[in-house]
Image (cartoon, helix red, strand yellow):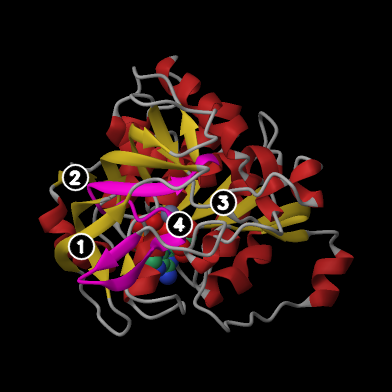
């Protein structure tokens, strides 16, 4: 059995998505059928449309989704029919040494990047052709089938638009600040790039009490959003950016986050922090983008440059925490949602993102 599902499909080489109907199979053992409530439109989807990353094709796009469990496969115990879930774009295998030591974010058994279920199959077809769910989520579709470990139960009080963003940009931003950087109250931080991910970092910095919080972006619209979420200073990029940040922070920030995925910005990140500070790469650059770093200066000043993928999120631990913070009024995720759109408007949302507009567009099903 299968069901038709209206979806946004990417074919390699295309800059736009086809809005079409795919077939979604019944959930196999260990997997869950989800009726989508909402899906965010994230910068990582744009990377695929712009040909920055190689992926299986064709692909149902979207990896930032939330919805209702419609059916479960044999052996599924974590969630039941009618439960509200956030989808994770990295499903842990729960068996490898990384998972068993609590570091599922570097799981060695997951096949999420191959865009397939644990057994190597895909639940999607289009006119008989195999189609892949992007990062084994494929949330730009009315229905999705995902591994049990990639569907995390959350309270029904959390609206789907908010829940969808918790599944990627919020988890990534919060995790970069809390799990990877370990920012302490009263320390200074700079965030370069204030799109969905950068604004999520700013929200987390505000929550943990960083001060000052400096946002850097080309767009005045984004800087205004940054101020609303807790940025104390907002700057547009300039050749003397490091000096301007040093003046605000008495010699350089304690923490710097790159949330664009741009080689030049990553290369300049260590210059924004003081000796002993931490520079964190959150934005993901195109494939094969080596960066050049002054290793002597880095070593002599005791600075660190670290990578942060998905904020080292452990979905089963972190999504419920983030949902609880939202419900307690301490994580204003709604403020990140600048546009609520229909699935048919998704190409327009990517065009706006390329122009540097919109904090976050969210597709409502
Ligand atoms: N200097 C400062 N800001 C810039 C620059 C620049 N040179 N170039 C782009 N920006 C800003 C844009 O104006 C925009 O606000 O970077 C922001 C990027 O945000 P989005 O396009 O909304 O992307 P987002 O979803 O936040 O993802 C950012 O994180 O997870 C990764 O793959 C993702 O690499 C992507 C990055
Ligand atoms: Zn994302």
Distance from Cα at disc 1 to Cα at disc 2? 11 Å
Q: Nearer the viewer, mark 3 or mark 4?
A: 4
Which residues make up the magenta segment?
A: 124-148
> How many other residues sit within 10 Å of disc 3, few (<14), some (14-19) or many (≥20)?
many
Q: Earlier in the sequence, mark 3 or mark 4?
A: 4
**Residue 352, which numbered label?**
1
Which residue does the numbered mark 4 point to in the structure image? 136
Labels 1 & 4 near each other (Cβ < 8 A): no
- Mark 3 vs 2, N-terminal side: 3
- The residue indicated by pointer 3 is 310
Mark 2, residues whose alpha carbon is within 10 Å: few (<14), some, or many (≥20)?
some
In front: label 2 or label 4: 4
Say what secondary structure mark 1 lies in: helix
| Cβ atoms at labels 2 and 4 below 8 Å apart | no
Foreground label between 1 and 4: 4
**Mark before the other along the chain sequence, 1 or 2:** 2
Image quadrant assignment for residue 332: top left
Would you name the residue on which mark 2 appears?
A: 339
Mark 2 and mark 4 lie on one chain; the one further toward the N terminus is: 4
Q: Could you classify mark 1 by the number of other residues whose Cα lies within 10 Å: few (under 14), some (14-19), or many (20 or more)?
A: few
**Which quadrant of the picture is home to ligand 1?**
bottom left
Q: Is residue 84 above or below residue 205?
A: above
Residue 141 visible to the viewer: yes
Q: Work out how far the residue at label 3 is from the one at label 2, CA to CA, in angstroms.
A: 23 Å
């Amino acid at each position: 059995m299968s069901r038709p599902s209206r979806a946004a499909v990417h074919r390699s080489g295309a800059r736009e998505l086809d809005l079409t109907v795919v077939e979604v199979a019944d959930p196999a053992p260990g997997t869950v059928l989800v009726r989508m409530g909402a899906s965010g439109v994230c910068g990582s989807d744009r990377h695929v449309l712009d040909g920055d990353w190689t992926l299986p094709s064709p692909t149902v796009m979207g990896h930032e989704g939330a919805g209702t469990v419609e059916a479960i496969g044999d052996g599924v115990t974590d969630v039941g029919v009618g439960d509200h879930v956030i989808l994770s774009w990295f499903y842990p295998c729960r068996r490898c040494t990384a998972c068993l030591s609590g570091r599922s974010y570097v799981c060695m058994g997951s096949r999420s990047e191959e865009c397939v279920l644990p057994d190597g199959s895909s639940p999607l077809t289009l006119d008989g052709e195999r189609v892949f769910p992007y990062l084994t989520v494929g949330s730009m579709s009315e229905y999705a089938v995902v591994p049990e470990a990639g569907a995390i139960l959350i309270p029904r009080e959390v609206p789907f638009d908010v829940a969808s963003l918790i599944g990627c940009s919020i988890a990534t931003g919060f995790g970069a600040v809390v799990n990877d950087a370990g920012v302490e109250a009263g320390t200074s931080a700079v965030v370069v790039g204030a799109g969905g991910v950068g604004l999520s970092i700013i929200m987390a910095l505000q929550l943990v009490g960083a001060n000052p919080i400096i946002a850097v972006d080309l767009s005045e619209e984004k800087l205004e959003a940054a101020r609303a979420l807790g940025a104390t200073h907002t700057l547009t990029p300039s050749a003397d950016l490091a000096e301007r940040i040093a003046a605000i922070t008495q010699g350089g920030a304690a923490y710097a986050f790159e949330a664009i995925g741009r080689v030049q910005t990553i290369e300049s990140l260590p210059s924004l922090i003081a000796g002993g500070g931490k520079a964190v790469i959150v934005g993901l650059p195109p494939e094969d983008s080596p960066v050049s770093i002054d290793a002597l200066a880095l070593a002599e000043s005791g600075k660190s440059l670290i990578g942060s993928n998905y904020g080292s999120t452990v979905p089963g631990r972190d999504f419920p925490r983030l949902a609880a913070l939202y419900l307690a009024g301490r994580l204003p995720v709604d403020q990140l949602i600048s546009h609520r759109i229909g699935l048919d408007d998704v190409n327009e949302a990517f065009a706006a993102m390329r122009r540097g507009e919109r904090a976050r567009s969210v597709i409502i099903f």
